[in-house]
Image (tube, helix red, strand yellow):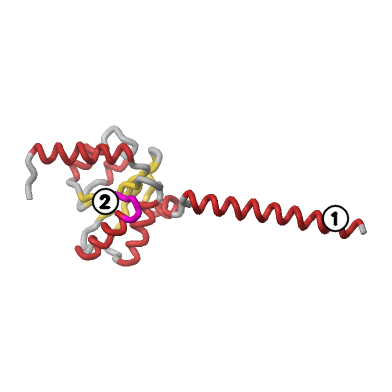
Amino acid sequence: MSLNITKKKMIVAKMIKINRKALSAVIADFCGVNSNNLNKLRKESRENNVIINIIRNKLLKLIIKNSSFEGLAPLIHGPILIAYSLKHPGSAARLFKNFNKIDENLKIKAAAFENKIIQSEDINLLANLPTYKEAITRFLIIIKDISVGKFFRVLLAIKNIK
């Protein structure tokens, strides 16, 4: 289906707004992915505050121009699926990584986070970033371990004195 210039401008304007709000972006090649699986991916993305779109490559290059995701431009060729993380920077990478277990035809090309390009081999760095709740939980466990360890050392010191 061909798009006229006004529809293209509307798409670009809408996606530029999303591009500005996004914390990270992940692009993937979706050639060979079943449409039912794509619908499942879209449903999961809505639940995880990730915006997924299939946009023509020329328009996508216009959208990411002069943004923190501009480094992805050389990797945009062929059928591209782009996912923007809105609440947590690793949510799109985590979503694609988990979906790749269901349908191996989805090939992650790269991600962009804080003006840096993360290649597909290193996507686990972004996908494994802890969420706010996970980070707080880890911090509390560390604090608990430190305080229990200190208390234990005090008890040992008291025992050795006697």
Residue 41: x, y in percent? 28, 59
Nearer-the-camera pick, 142 or 31: 142
State the residue position of label 1.
157
Q: Crowding near pointer 2: few (<14 within 10 Å), some, many (20+)?
A: many
Image height check: is 52 above or below 10? below
Magenta stretch, residue numbers: 47-51
Placement of the C terminus among the 4 image quadrants: bottom right
Image label count: 2
Q: Is residue 26 left or right of residue 39?
A: right
Residue 100, magenta (yes or no): no
The residue identified by callout 2 is 52
Residue at the (19%, 63%) spot, across then down: 35
- Horizontal relation, residue 3 to residue 73: left or right: left
Type of amino acid under label 2: Ile
At horizontal 31% and vertical 37% (from top left) the residue drawn is 20
Could you tell me residue 32's position as x and y percent?
21, 63
